[in-house]
Amino acid sequence: MRKWLMLTMLGCACAAASAQTLVHFPSTDGPPATMLDGYLFPAPGAGRHPALVFLHGCAGMFSRSGRVCARERDWAARFNAAGITVLEVDSFTPRHHGQMCSPASFDGAIYRARPFDAYGALRYLQSLETVMPDRVGVVGWSQGGGTVLSAIRASSAARPASLPDGDFRAAVAFYPARCSTKAQGAEWQSAVPLLVLIGEQDVWSPFAACKALFDAVAPGTDATFHAYPGAYHDFDWPDMPVHTVPAFTTRAGVVPIEGTDPAARADAQQRVLDYVGAHLLGN
């Protein structure tokens, strides 16, 4: 715990993430199982470390330059500095698909497969000699956040019948897609502790519907819902000016708005590190 407190105090001084390594592992969506790509950001130091699965948003995990997106690289650096390994799952490239942000590009079959990808990543991490198999969590953004909700809920079809090393230890969902009682059902329930972070001005993952879902979770569900007044979608992205995205106008005619909110981003950085640290690094 003392080590964790020291890392928390030094969280603002995080270095670049470890150089990522391309790895391959099967989803649990089979048979036949899709062979997925993943990018492993190992925590520094010898021995076993806790780990996190990262689930990207609807645009995929790469920027136009071909690098892993800045948001995920930034978070990977912060978690690596805290002694946590990160595995980001690429659900799109192995299925020969690009972005799924516009209604025309959305592929329901791929979206429904993503919770199985999350569990494929869990099993892969649990097989590594450098990972503590009973201390693996999951973090998702936007569509990846919606995947978190679907993967860890009690009624999840993606959860393997046998998880000898345990389920996800904790989960974080940033502005999750499909965050509503219509999409998730009434009284959402999970045995996995969950932290949800969303901006009150988010129109892409509508705030009001998401809040209503988590105002009425099933008894015994450990879900924490935190909202940021004035913040839009992608509020934790590094240095993104707030802007509209007409190309991704929803079927309901809503024009998405996204961009960094410095205050919300700073709070989320500390809040998420504290939350994940308590579940993965605590005794």
Image (spheres, helix red, strand yellow):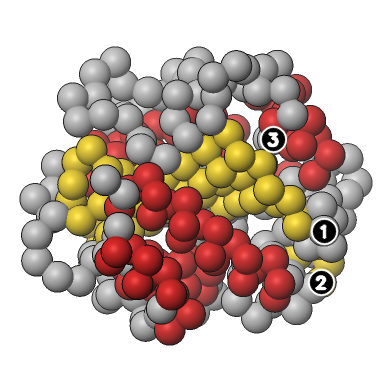
Callout 1 amino acid: Pro
Q: Is residue 166 visible?
A: yes
Instruction: State whether residue 108 is above or below residue 121.
Output: above
Q: CA distance from mark 1 to mark 2?
A: 17 Å
* The residue positioned farthest toward the right in the image shown: 253
State the SS at label 1: loop
- Measuring from the top left, give residue 77's x and y in whole percent: 38, 73
Instruction: State whether residue 152 is above or below residue 134.
Output: above
- Mark 3 or mark 1: whose residue is earlier in sequence: 3
How crowded pointer 1 is (Cα within 10 Å; few <14, some 14-19, many 20+) is rated as few
Residue displayed at 74% across by 51% down: 227
Instruction: Give the mark toward the camera: 3 or 1.
Output: 1
Instruction: Give the mark toward the camera: 1 or 2.
Output: 1
Residue displayed at 74% across by 46% down: 205
Instruction: Give the mark toward the camera: 2 or 3.
Output: 3
In the rendered view of the protein, which quadrant contains the N terminus?
bottom left
- Which of the labelled discs sits on residue 229, or is there none? 1
Is 245 or 201 nearer to us in this picture?
A: 201
Callout 3 amino acid: Cys
Residue displayed at 62% across by 71% down: 266
Badge count: 3
- Which of the labelled discs sits on residue 243, or is there none? 2
Callout 2 amino acid: His
- Measuring from the top left, give residue 241's x and y in whole percent: 75, 78
What residue sits right under mark 3 in the picture? 179
Which of the 4 image quadrants contains residue 267?
Answer: bottom right
State the SS at label 2: strand
Is 158 or 76 nearer to us in this picture?
A: 76
Q: Residue 49 vs residue 265: left or right?
A: left
